[in-house]
Image: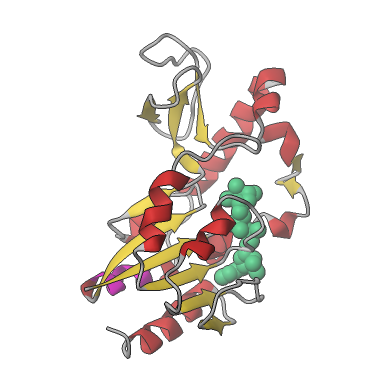
Amino acid sequence: MKNLVILSGAGMSQESGIRTFRDMGGLWEEYDISEVATPEAWARNPELVMRFYNDRRKQLYECVPNSGHFGLVGLEKDFDVRIITQNVDDLHERAGSTKVLHLHGELKKARSSVDETLVYDIDGWELKFGQKCAKGSQLRPHIVWFGEAVPAIEEAIPVVEKSDILVVIGTSLNVYPAAGLVNYAKRGAPVFVIDPERPQVFVRNVTYIQEKAGKGVEILKEKLKLLV
Ligand code: APR
């Protein structure tokens, strides 16, 4: 089976009712991103950061995967599919995709504020002050904030290097190191980009499918029939 790697971003979940980042013009549900999504914000105003992510998590429980997420699950019949997502939602998993790597963390998890390897599932939508890790420190949202390292990139690079086909869905490719992953694709391997806009990818053999994720995945599946 050929290796098919999907790199997904906020546009993947837009049809599930989750707004993309670029849509919000620097504001995220009325907050300046630097006030809620940085380690400095957590140090300065942990209550605000906690409330912000609790609200996002509550919202996520009301969302369901869209036809794009479900369409990708079907590809596992014919390809060895790996999904590398910048999204912190769990919509790929809820749709049924089996191999999902989260680059920027996961909304439904919490982690230790002193040891990033200590990660826990959050029970329900609310993470509370007083909930602590095994080492006794307060749990924080398991989110890679702006200015923090992206440890999962080390696992993602060899996955992209081994891909026979790369599919980019719903990401503006503005945020590094995730955006740089495209450059690890094998020389000449087909790359498909599903996005109503045309994010720039500087590789050969690119096919743009200028549609939203739902319709775009349907078109992609037709094209992939020739590459099984
Ligand atoms: N289907 C497919 N693509 C869509 C859709 C849709 N329904 N709606 C919008 N898009 C496209 C936009 O045209 C844009 O190119 O999705 C892309 C969204 O880009 P961003 O909002 O920049 O999201 P993303 O690339 O995932 O952002 C990366 O930035 O804020 C940080 O950590 C956060 O993971 C996030 C990272």
Where does the image place residue 201, in percent across and percent down from the top left? 60, 71
- What's the magenta region? 70-76
Image point (70%, 25%), residue name: 40
Instruction: Name the main secondary structure of what is drawn in magenta.
Output: helix
Residue 79 versus residue 47 in the image, above or below: below
Q: Which quarter of the figure is the C terminus placed in? A: bottom left
Where does the image place residue 76, in percent across and percent down from the top left? 26, 69
**Camera-side residue: 62 or 9?**
9
Identity of the residue furthest to the top in this view = 136
Image point (49%, 78%), residue name: 192
Image point (59%, 63%), residue name: 171
**Camera-side residue: 32 or 114?**
114
- What is the quadrant of residue 179 in the picture? bottom right
Total numbered labels placed on residues in the image: 0
User: In this view of the protein, can residue 18 be seen by the observer?
Assistant: no
Q: Quadrant of ligand 1?
A: bottom right
Find out whether residue 20 is within the magenta segment. Answer: no
Find out whether residue 74 is within the magenta segment. Answer: yes
User: In this view of the protein, can residue 131 be seen by the observer?
Assistant: yes
Image point (54%, 46%), residue name: 59
Q: How is the image coloured?
A: secondary structure
Residue 116 versus residue 62 in the image, above or below: above
Q: Which quarter of the figure is the N terminus placed in? A: bottom left
Residue 80 versus residue 143 in the image, above or below: below
